[in-house]
Image (cartoon, rainbow, N blue to C red):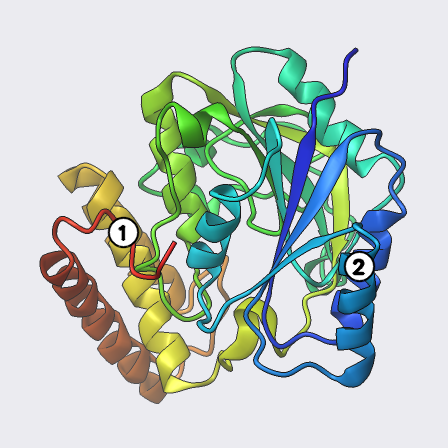
């Protein structure tokens, strides 16, 4: 096959050693035609990291854009509007790529109906608790936008198949989605940007193209606890509020009234009450506190939609 030109996009925020390792992993790939776009939202790097970035820019191995804000969806949009690839591959700044990773994504685009590829994620934290779980076919609920988020497993699934969404640390898109259909990531997804990639993927349904899961397009997600999307502690008040805000924002934007209700019920059952697959602390104090954030997140999402009418989800300068 004729390999398409790829743009490898790496948004980064407050990452040092792991960013250096990620860049080395990317540049060791033997794919024939690709560019690397780094959107850096870090004010000041450690000297070793800055020296590496400067060297890679001077030698033409990466294109570096430095911005003075921190937003994962906005960083993705910033790169979309500056990259040249026929296929745009998004990875996180804390990943390790195996040999042939780019080819594994690119070969799926020989099929004209494929608009996006979701790759498998060997999540370091989740695989440690997997007990050898292997999934062949995802259940029908994984294609139901009201409850899909509790049935889509792109960690343990081993069989290629159509899916509803991808994971943000390992996903690629045909440029047609950006140029012809003018799709962009919604910059109103706050904090850790939970569900921003799900929101984007739901819009692909309008194009007639599909999202294809290919477990061969796999990587290791290191899941660093600081920097990147995880710059806000999961125990912080801001994280908790944004977590529910982002779920409800995705739902209110994309789902039917019945689907919104079903998502709200499942979200409450799992994340507030702590029932499987969340397995959270079911103590009364924890449930009450999570209930408060749940309600605040719903109101916050409604307020976000009301106060940003007409902005098409764009907050930061492009």
Q: Position of residue 246 (x, y in %)?
A: 33, 60
For residue 80, side relative to residue 57 (left or right)? left
The quadrant in which residue 41 appears is bottom right
Total labels: the figure holds 2
Tell me residue 253's x, y (percent).
22, 45
Q: Position of residue 175 (x, y in %)?
A: 51, 28
Mark 1 nearby-residue class (10 Å; few <14, some 14–19, many ≥20): some
Q: Residue furthest bottom?
A: 285
Question: Which quarter shows the N terminus?
Answer: top right
The vertical placement of 294 against 120, above or below, is below
Q: Position of residue 16 (x, y in %)?
A: 74, 76
Secondary element at image label 2: helix
Q: Residues within 10 Å of mark 2 (few under 14, many from 20)?
A: few
Q: Name the image quarter holding residue 268.
A: bottom left
| Left or right side of 49 for 202 | left
Measured in 3D between alpha carbons, the distance from the residue under mark 1 to the one under mark 2, in whole angstroms, is 35 Å
98 or 133, which lies in front?
Answer: 98
Against 131, residue 100 (above or below) is: above
Q: Which mark is residue 58?
A: 2
Identified at 85% across, 53% down, the residue is 25
In the rendered view, tell whether residue 173 sits above or below residue 45: above
**Residue 245 sits in which quadrant?**
bottom left
Q: Residue at x 34, y 33 (%)?
A: 203
As rendered, which of 124 and 230 lies closer to the eye? Answer: 230
Q: Secondary structure at mark 1?
A: loop
The residue under the point 68% across, 72% down is 224
What residue sits right under mark 1 in the picture?
Answer: 313
Q: Is residue 44 above or below residue 120?
A: below
First of labels 1, 2 by sequence position: 2
């Amino acid at each position: 096959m004729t390999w398409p030109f790829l743009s490898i996009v790496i948004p980064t925020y407050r990452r040092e050693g792991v960013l250096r390792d990620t860049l080395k992993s990317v540049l060791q790939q033997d794919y024939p035609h690709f560019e690397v776009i780094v959107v850096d939202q870090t004010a000041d790097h450690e000297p070793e990291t800055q020296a590496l970035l400067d060297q890679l820019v001077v030698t033409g191995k990466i294109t570096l854009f430095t911005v003075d804000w921190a937003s994962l969806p906005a960083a993705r949009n910033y790169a979309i509007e500056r990259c040249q690839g026929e296929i745009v591959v998004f990875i996180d700044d804390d990943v390790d790529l195996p040999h042939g990773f780019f080819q594994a994504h690119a070969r799926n685009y020989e099929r004209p109906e494929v608009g996006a590829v979701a790759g498998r994620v060997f999540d370091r934290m989740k695989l440690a608790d997997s007990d050898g779980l292997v999934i062949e076919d995802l259940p029908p609920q994984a294609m139901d936008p009201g409850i899909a988020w509790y049935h889509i497993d792109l960690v343990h699934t081993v069989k290629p198949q159509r899916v509803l969404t991808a994971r943000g640390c390992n996903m690629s898109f045909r440029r047609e989605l950006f140029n012809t259909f003018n799709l962009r990531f919604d910059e109103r997804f706050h904090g850790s940007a939970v569900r921003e990639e799900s929101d984007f993927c739901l819009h692909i349904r309008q194009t007639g193209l599909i999202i294809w899961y290919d477990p061969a397009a796999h990587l290791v997600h290191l899941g660093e606890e600081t920097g990147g999307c995880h710059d806000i502690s999961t125990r912080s008040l801001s994280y908790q509020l944004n977590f529910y805000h982002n779920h409800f924002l995705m739902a209110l934007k994309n789902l039917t009234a019945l689907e919104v209700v079903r998502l709200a019920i499942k979200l409450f059952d799992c994340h507030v009450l702590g029932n499987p697959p969340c397995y959270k602390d079911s103590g009364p104090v924890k449930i009450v506190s999570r209930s408060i954030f749940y309600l605040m997140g719903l109101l916050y999402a409604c307020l976000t939609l009301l106060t940003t009418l007409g902005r098409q989800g764009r907050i930061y300068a492009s």
